[in-house]
Image (cartoon, rainbow, N blue to C red):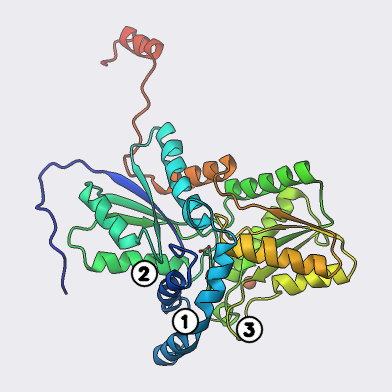
Amino acid sequence: MFRKPEPAYRHGSASKTAVLLCNLGTPDAPTPAALRRYLAQFLGDPRVVEIPKLVWKLILHGIILRTRPAKSAAKYASIWLPEGSPLQVWTAKQAKLLQGWLGERGHQLIVRHAMRYGEPAIAATLDALRAEGVTRVLVLPAYPQYSGATTASVIDDVARWALGTRHLPELRFINRYHDDPLHIAALADSVRRHWAANGRAERLLMSFHGMPARTLALGDPYHCECLKTGRLLAEALGLGADQYLITFQSRFGKAKWLEPYTEPSLIKLATAGVRSVDVICPGFAADCLETLEEIDQEARAAFLAAGGQRFGYIPCLNDSEPGLRAWTALIERHLQGWPTQQAPQPDAAQRERALAAGASD
Ligand SMILES: C=CC1=C(C)c2cc3[nH]c(cc4nc(cc5[nH]c(cc1n2)c(C)c5CCC(=O)O)C(CCC(=O)O)=C4C)c(C)c3C=C
Ligand SMILES: [Fe+2]
Ligand SMILES: [Fe+2]
């Protein structure tokens, strides 16, 4: 196996820790060419589409990559920010803010972000961290619920990088935080803030990204973890069973996906006379195409066209303080045993008392 040359080992180098925040990735422009590159990498990942390789290669390259890039590019164009794709902008900002939050807690470490598909690539970011002398890496996939298609795919990518690397850092992964109390509190806070600003709708709909239904039977915990997040969020808000729904969005292809589907559920609600809904997407750490276009544009239009009158979209945690506080505490728990934090300095009075008692300083 080929391994790239690495700098000579230097005796006595200090240990250095990094946190790597990984999200899915996004095209680098809202154009058909950029979408073709992005979708080829994303949909070519066998963790994402689990059908025999050769059959899928023919369908992907023969059909999907000829038609989907132009359609998806138009959708991305409708949400693109002056600084780039929302997912890219939020993830970069989250890493920067986390650096500050962890720094304030006394941790000496580096926080970077990377993307599973597109840029900044996980392997290149890990190479850069090693070049900076990093000896320990805590990987945080930005997915509250574990799934083979997302969390495991990030771990695959780190493992692939590890295969080609001689001097490995110590590695740790955070596989899930779907039921973390501070995470649930952050979601509940975002709903309450929305209610305070806009009033409360008749129903709260929690929409999670879908997965093929067969992954549940194959042992993927994603469905159960989505339901648990939803139940805990409803409990935190004091909602009864008739006041909220959990649904799954973004169905891809013709196979059965996890149900109930988001858009048909919204149409059903409107048809049954529900006039107002609030929608939150608790499976997404940052707003992206799937929330800003599919929910806040498409699903909103479907609900209103079916007779609904008010559709409130509740943004993802993005750069909110409760969200960052939850991540900070989660990271701190997973850093345990890695000496990143300065020992607390005894204050002057404490030191004097210790000296007076004859203890050595
Ligand atoms: C939050 C968890 C996600 C799961 C689970 C997930 C599974 C999954 N996705 C696809 C296909 C597509 N997803 C697309 C976009 C997309 N997906 C997620 C997250 C999860 N996907 C995010 C955050 C995004 C948005 C990226 C952005 O740039 O904003 C797309 C691309 C857009 C499009 O062309 O529609 C596809 C395709 C599958 C097949 C799958 C599970 C097997
Ligand atoms: Fe997706
Ligand atoms: Fe389940």
Q: In this image, 254 relative to 21: left or right?
A: right
281 vs 224: above or below = above
Q: In this image, 358 relative to 240: left or right?
A: left
Which tag is nearer the camera, tag 2 or tag 1?
1
Which type of secondary structure does the marked residue at label 1 adopt? helix
- Mark 3 and mark 2: Cα distance apart in space: 26 Å
- Residue labelled with disc 2: 156
Category of crowding for the residue at label 2, using alpha-carbon neighbours closer than 10 angstroms: few (below 14), some (14–19), many (at least 20): some
- Horizontal and vertical percent for residue 242? 83, 62
Which type of secondary structure does the marked residue at label 2 adopt? helix
- Mark 3 and mark 1: Cα distance apart in space: 22 Å
Of 37 and 16, nearer the camera is 37
Of 80 and 346, nearer the camera is 80
Category of crowding for the residue at label 1, using alpha-carbon neighbours closer than 10 angstroms: few (below 14), some (14–19), many (at least 20): some
- Horizontal and vertical percent for residue 217? 57, 81
- Residue labelled with disc 1: 65
Which label belongs to residue 8?
Answer: none
**Which numbered disc, 3 or 2, marks the residue that appears first in the sequence?**
2
Instruction: Confirm whether residue 255 shows in the render.
Output: yes
Which label belongs to residue 256?
Answer: 3
- Horizontal and vertical percent for residue 231? 70, 59
Name the amino acid, label 2.
Asp
User: Would you say the beta carbon of the disc 2 residue lies within 8 angstroms of ligand 1?
Assistant: no
Name the amino acid, label 1.
Leu
Residue at 12% across / 53% down in the picture? 7
Residue at 15% across / 72% down in the picture? 2
Which tag is nearer the camera, tag 3 or tag 1?
1
- Mark 2 and mark 1: Cα distance apart in space: 24 Å
